[in-house]
Image (spheres, rainbow, N blue to C red):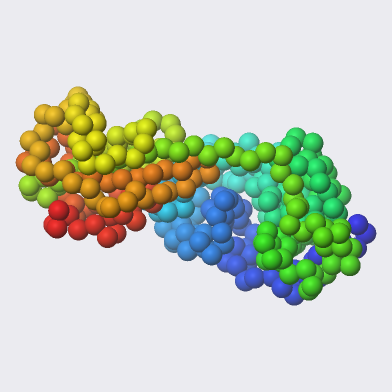
């Protein structure tokens, strides 16, 4: 343990990637990067980081933004609760804390959407507080180097890894240590095919020496994935409009816009969908409108096979059904040409990228 910190930092200084948030210690930018990179690869998150700081150069401008604008900018990153929490925290700092970002771990962790890992990262990188970060990269690196088989998803495992990281951290330079161990897990001690032969710890790494690389880190249980079957109804009026509504209820994609949704128990074919859509109620401007009451000219599938969209706990089987109607009286309609202005789930956005409503 005595030379772990030095070896790690030496490796980092020679191998670290040049990332935009590493050139600043401004807590707004560090916080923004950490929220964006939660459950997101650096390659995917970096363009979003640039887009956000361009649109919102400071926390006040983010706080003042409309939520729909924030969600539209976030579109494609998934886990949209992160964007809503980001916006809520910006308002908290801008309006309740006079625009001053909290400077200690104990205050930072009180912010909405901020957990131990993010609070530790901000406190150490921006304010030099000796708080070790522990995320998936850190679990993997420490479990392999020290041969720890305690499940990382257990209460005892989380405490054990946190305590170990806290013992190992360089108290003189906690910011560099934390960035180093995150980088090491992300680029060197990778989940698959880690660079063991060129690793600074290969002579002492328990997993490498004992052939346990593939086994560690160990998890207690697997996440149970639920299958759901979504049928989106794309209504097209004679004057080139469609129906798009905002998802207000809690759950996936809260705050985003989508087409009227009929959820089924299994995949539907056209005939079964025609039966299921009878009596289907669509949220109207004043009251729900029954699909049966619309003057429907035709219904056909928008694609041949369902689109499979995987989330952390759910696997969505998504089908789009195109219904031509004379008009959509009583429903909130938008011109098809303005569809791109709305924040929608990525699965809808991808489908619409190739959809030509004029052909339907």
Residue nearest the observer in this picture, 7 or 198: 198
The answer to which image quadrant residue 284 occupies is top left
The answer to whether residue 196 is above or below residue 151 is below
For the N terminus, the quadrant is: bottom right
Who's the residue at 33% across and 34% down the image? 263
Who's the residue at 59% across and 46% down the image? 100
Q: Is residue 119 left or right of residue 201?
A: left
| Position of residue 168 measured from the top left corner of the image (x, y, whole percent) | 85, 54
Q: Is residue 290 visible?
A: yes
Who's the residue at 84% across and 67% down the image? 202
Q: Is residue 266 left or right of residue 275?
A: right
Residue nearest the observer in this picture, 107 or 250: 250
| Position of residue 274 measured from the top left corner of the image (x, y, whole percent) | 19, 36
| Position of residue 133 measured from the top left corner of the image (x, y, whole percent) | 73, 50
Q: Is residue 124 visible?
A: no
Residue nearest the observer in this picture, 40 or 292: 292
Who's the residue at 52% across and 59% down the image? 45
| Position of residue 170 measured from the top left corner of the image (x, y, whole percent) | 84, 57
Residue nearest the observer in this picture, 344 or 24: 344
């Amino acid at each position: 343990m005595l030379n772990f910190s030095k070896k790690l930092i030496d490796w980092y200084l020679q191998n670290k990637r040049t990332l935009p948030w590493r050139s600043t210690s401004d807590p707004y930018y560090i916080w923004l990067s950490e929220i964006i990179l939660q459950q997101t690869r650096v390659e995917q998150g970096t363009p979003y980081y640039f887009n956000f700081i361009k649109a919102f150069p400071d926390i006040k401008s983010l706080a003042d933004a409309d939520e729909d604008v924030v969600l539209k900018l976030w579109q494609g990153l998934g886990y949209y609760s992160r964007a809503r929490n980001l916006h809520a925290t910006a308002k908290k700092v801008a309006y309740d804390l006079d625009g001053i970002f909290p400077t200690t771990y104990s205050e930072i962790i009180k912010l909405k959407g901020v957990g131990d890992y993010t609070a530790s990262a901000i406190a150490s990188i921006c304010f030099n507080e000796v708080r070790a970060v522990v995320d998936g990269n850190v679990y993997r690196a420490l479990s392999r180097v020290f041969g720890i088989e305690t499940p990382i998803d257990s209460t005892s495992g989380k405490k054990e890894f946190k305590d170990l990281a806290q013992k190992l951290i360089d108290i003189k330079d906690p910011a560099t240590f934390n960035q180093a161990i995150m980088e090491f897990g992300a680029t060197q001690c990778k989940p698959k095919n880690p660079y063991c032969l060129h690793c600074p710890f290969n002579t002492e790494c328990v997993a490498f020496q004992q052939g346990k690389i593939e086994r560690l880190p160990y998890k207690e249980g697997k996440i149970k994935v639920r299958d759901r079957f979504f049928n989106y109804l794309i209504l097209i009026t004679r004057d080139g409009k469609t129906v798009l509504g905002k998802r207000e209820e809690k759950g996936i994609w809260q705050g985003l816009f989508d087409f009227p949704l009929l959820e089924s128990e299994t995949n539907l074919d056209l005939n079964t969908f025609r039966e299921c859509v009878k009596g289907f109620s669509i949220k109207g401007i004043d009251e729900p409108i029954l699909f049966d009451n619309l003057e429907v000219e035709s219904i056909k599938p928008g694609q041949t096979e369902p689109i499979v969209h995987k989330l952390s706990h759910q696997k969505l089987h998504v089908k789009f059904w195109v219904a031509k109607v004379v008009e959509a009286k009583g429903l909130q309609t938008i011109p098809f040409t303005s569809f791109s202005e709305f924040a929608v789930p990525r699965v809808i956005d991808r489908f619409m990228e190739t959809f030509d409503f004029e052909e339907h």
